[in-house]
Amino acid sequence: MELELRHLRALCAIADAGSVSRAAAGLGYSQPAMSTQLRRIERHFGQALFERSPRGVEPTPYGAEVLGRARDVLARMDAIGGHPPGEAASAEACRTLRLAATNSPVLPGLVSRLRSRAPDVGLRVSSVYSSADIVGLLEQGELDAAVAADYPGLDLRHSDAVRHRGIVTEPSFVALPARHRLRHRSEIELAELADDAWFVTPDDGAGWPGVFHSACARAGFAPATVHEFLGDQLQLQHMIAEGLGVSVVQATLRPIAGVVVKPLAGTPLWCRYLLAWRSEGVPDELAESLHAAATASYRDLIAQAAHFQAWAARG
């Protein structure tokens, strides 16, 4: 078949409705006719564009990509008929969201889900380690939204130009070499690691590593050796596996061979991940989609973290 604008509108209607039958009703088709049309469109593309879920139908990763382009084509066609060229260009710019994230594994799942929830929104993604830098970039209008971090009692500070909403507050764990003397323990007292070398990431502008050193002080020691480290998690894990030190890690960390992750007794360290966005420039609906995508991404990650599940089961 030859792809037409009506086919693109049908795809967008299905994505927006989350249901073939609801999309059919909205477009004045019967449900069987809409299903037949969808099958023909999918044959044209050579693969499924939607998959069934408990909530109805959701775009596949490829379907989300097709939808993004379909919406772009439809928007351009609408612009030709109803807006001067300058307005069309402005609308196109507004659909590009500048998104950043601190050192968090939430980002890939967030981006994937956002493409499904808001396929008409383009993304420009960057990594910004410091949450203080993230706030500055948001306040200066150089970012639109970001995943940042703060700590209990040290809420992220920003002006009224920025809003934020918590994604999750999680306990911090410790990663040890698999041959570490405490490897068989179900949980570890922070003080028991007083003589170990530590890998510690630099100042994040939100309270780290101050909260780490404060926790060590409360446990009655100062770390004997501290290696300041800002690199990818895989590189860090390889160094831990080699027995070069231990590290505070996120609850979602997936340990590689040679590394074990343990809870700290009494959970002396917690971290909150949050979504921050510009008050002007990010509509409430988009902020809600971003937050929903981030929380869903985190749920998927934490469900695969056996050390967290064991910790949670102990209550």
Image (spheres, rainbow, N blue to C red):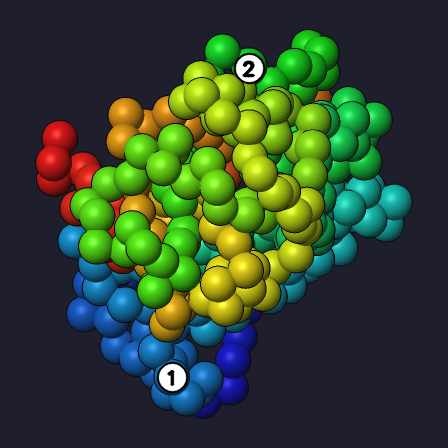
- Indicate the quadrant containing the C terminus: top left, top right, bottom left or bottom right: top left
- Which residue is at 53% across, 75% downward? 4
Residue 284: image x %, image y %?
Answer: 53, 25
> Could you classify mark 2 by the number of other residues whose Cα lies within 10 Å: few (under 14), some (14-19), or many (20 or more)?
few
Asked if 9 appears above or below 250 in the picture, the reply is: below
Residue 225 location, x and y as percent?
A: 61, 43
Crowd band around label 1 with a 10 angstrom C-alpha radius: few (<14), some (14–19), many (20+): few
Residue 210: % across, % down? 60, 24
Residue at (41, 88) in percent of width and height:
46
| Three-letter residue code for mark 1 | Gln
Tell me if I can see residue 106 in this picture: no
Q: Name the residue under label 1.
A: 47
- Left or right: residue 194 compared with residue 125: left
Marked residue nearer the N-terminal end (1 or 2): 1
Give the Cα separation between the discs numbered 1 and 2: 46 Å
Amino acid at the residue labelled 2: Asp
Foreground pick, 95 / 232: 232
Q: Residue at x 55, y 15 (%)?
A: 155
Name the image quarter holding the N terminus. Answer: bottom left
**Residue to which mark 2 is pinned:** 155
